[in-house]
Image (tube, grey):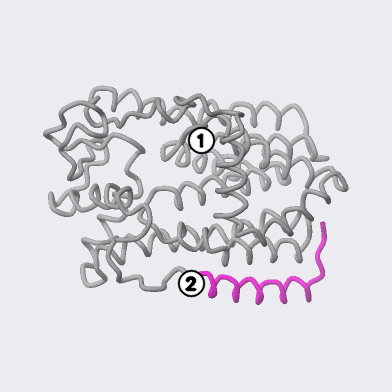
Amino acid sequence: MTIPKKITNLSSLILLAIVMIGIFLRSYKIHEALGDWHSWRQADTASVAREYVKAGKIDLLHPQFHDLSSIPSGLDNPDGWRMVEFPLRDGLHAFLATEFPSLGFLEVGRGLSILFSTLTIVIIYFIVLPLSGPVAALSSSLIYAILPYNIFYGRVILPEPMLVMFTMFTLLAYMRYIDTAKLRYWFTTLLSLSCALLLKPTALIILLPMLGYFFASSNKNLKLFFSSAVLPALAIIPYYFWRHHIAAYPAGIPASAWLFNSNGIRFKGAWFRWLFGERIAKLILGYWGLIPLGFGLIKLGQKKQETLVYSGLLLGSLAYLALIATG
């Protein structure tokens, strides 16, 4: 879609203001200790970077942390192996903390998440802009920037802010590839999706909106179809090798089978109440967020492209909730 230059310039200024607001909100008490919600998981993540700094080298293939107990995996772990997500974030955290020690280890860790979260604000704008126009794009970025739940998780020392950034950037790069058929966007999509999968394989849910954008595009052809089809197959290769590597360190792999409906809660009344009532409606949207969500759902179906992309995001999210039923 073509957007008038004046609107584009105005949108850029508003987006800049939204970004500044997002950074300001996420920087609140950035020097405080890790004593907030989910602090135990943040401490685990920060611990890997701390061990890198202490060792004086960053060995991405052999991450370690301070927990030497058998609690996470059920096996004795005297070497403190931490074999979960590929430590891309932890390595970057350790590198920056070593190069700029005056900034503070904790502040660098939170600052990285603020950076990734801020980039996501911008990425959301550029995803929504061609689909729904500047008003919807700015509204989406603003909601992501000021939603209290996003503010908190946009500054935590966890892999999720980086994961969300790479996942959303994968969709944006793919949209550019379908629109232009330029190879550089294909490689960008592949690299971004590979990084996202190394952090969490659940990033695969982004394939649904990507598929929706392809089928809604007027540029689709067999070449784009086959090049799109090989993307997930190639992107998952680094993740496969990472899983193969960490299999040699079972003591460092936390138990995860309990996440997949271990208590049989999936699709029962408690599951719906816990996820859609307590978590999404109350904790994430704060009830008031149900209003714009409702308007968005009502609008689905008016435009093919935005309907397929947004429906893909929605279905992917629901699939994640159904799969990780207990987590």
Please determine whether, in this image, residue 216 is positioned above or below residue 281: above
| Distance of label 1 from label 2 (alpha carbons) | 28 Å
Question: At which x and y percent is residue 24?
Answer: 48, 75
The disc label shown at residue 7, or none:
none
Question: At which x and y percent is residue 198?
Answer: 42, 37
Among the two numbered marks 1 and 2 on one chain, the one whose residue lies closer to the N terminus: 2
Q: Is residue 46 left or right of residue 67?
A: right
For residue 217: magenta?
no
Which sits in the foreground, 181 or 21?
21
Q: How crowded is mark 2: few (under 14 residues within 10 Å), some or many (20 or more)?
A: some
- Amino acid type at mark 1: Thr
The disc label shown at residue 202, or none:
1
Highlighted range, magenta? 1-24
Question: At which x and y percent is residue 308?
Answer: 77, 40
Q: Residues within 10 Å of mark 1 (few under 14, many from 20)?
A: some
The residue drawn where x is 38% and y is 60% is 112
Q: Mark 2 points at which residue?
A: 25
Please determine whether, in this image, residue 65 is positioned above or below residue 139: above
